[in-house]
Amino acid sequence: MGMQQHRMSRERILEGAGIILDSGKYGHLTVDALARSLHMSKSTLYKYFASKEDVVVALVEESCAAAEVELARALASGTAAEQLTKLAEIIGRHGERLPRAVLVEPERLPAICSERLAVTRAHFADAAHQIVTQGVANKSFAHPAPDIVAVAFVAAALAMLAKAAQSDKPEYEVTLGYLPELYLPALQA
């Protein structure tokens, strides 16, 4: 099997699993259901992933890695206000990349997924802290407690992701687009 074929099948499996998990129910993803939905034998599926948990781990890893790459780019330029807005957008795209079941039923995830999500969330928190602290240092922001604002911003963003995932048609990026509008006036006052 060629490398291109391997990549296409792996991506196809991840896409199929994402579709099933977008139902919002972790229990809907079984090896049988995934193989059936992809018109693929279970033995073929097992050539790429040892278990459904491995599929979920790969989905979470890809989403987290993409968010962290975006985050590094976002922090490389722009004003503090622009960076905070970009951070909200990145968190929104992160939510869009994650299947809904990951956000709705995090307690059902394999431990490695929870740990990986925690690492990415810590990156979000560090980025918010860095943005707000730099904004205060360069006098773009005047808030006396930048640590509190950074923590509140990320906590609100993550809560909004979870809330949006519970709706029939989650619009993470749109929902999180309102967050900077709430925080920037307070920071700039």
Image: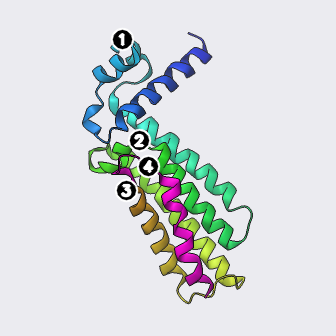
Alpha carbon distance from label 4 to label 3:
17 Å
Mark on residue 160?
none
Of badges 4 and 1, the one in the foreground is: 1
Horizontal arrangement in the rendering, residue 96 relative to residue 21 (left or right): right
Q: Which residues are magenta?
A: 162-189
Mark on residue 99?
2
Helix or strand or loop: what does disc 1 sit on? loop
Work out whether mark 2 precedes mark 4 in sequence or the reverse, and give the earlier one: 2
Callout 3 environment at 10 Å: few (<14), some (14 to 19), or many (20+)?
many
Alpha carbon distance from label 3 to label 2:
11 Å
Work out whether mark 1 precedes mark 2 in sequence or the reverse, and give the earlier one: 1
Q: Is residue 121 magenta?
A: no
Q: Position of residue 9 (x, y in %)?
A: 50, 19
Work out whether mark 4 precedes mark 1 in sequence or the reverse, and give the earlier one: 1
Q: Position of residue 8 (x, y in %)?
A: 55, 20
Question: Colour scheme in the image?
Answer: rainbow
Of badges 2 and 4, the one in the foreground is: 2
Q: Relative to the observer, which residue lies in front, 45 or 182? A: 182
Q: Relative to the observer, which residue lies in front, 47 or 173? A: 173
The amino acid marked with disc number 1 is Ser
The amino acid marked with disc number 4 is Arg
Alpha carbon distance from label 3 to label 1:
34 Å
Mark on residue 162?
3
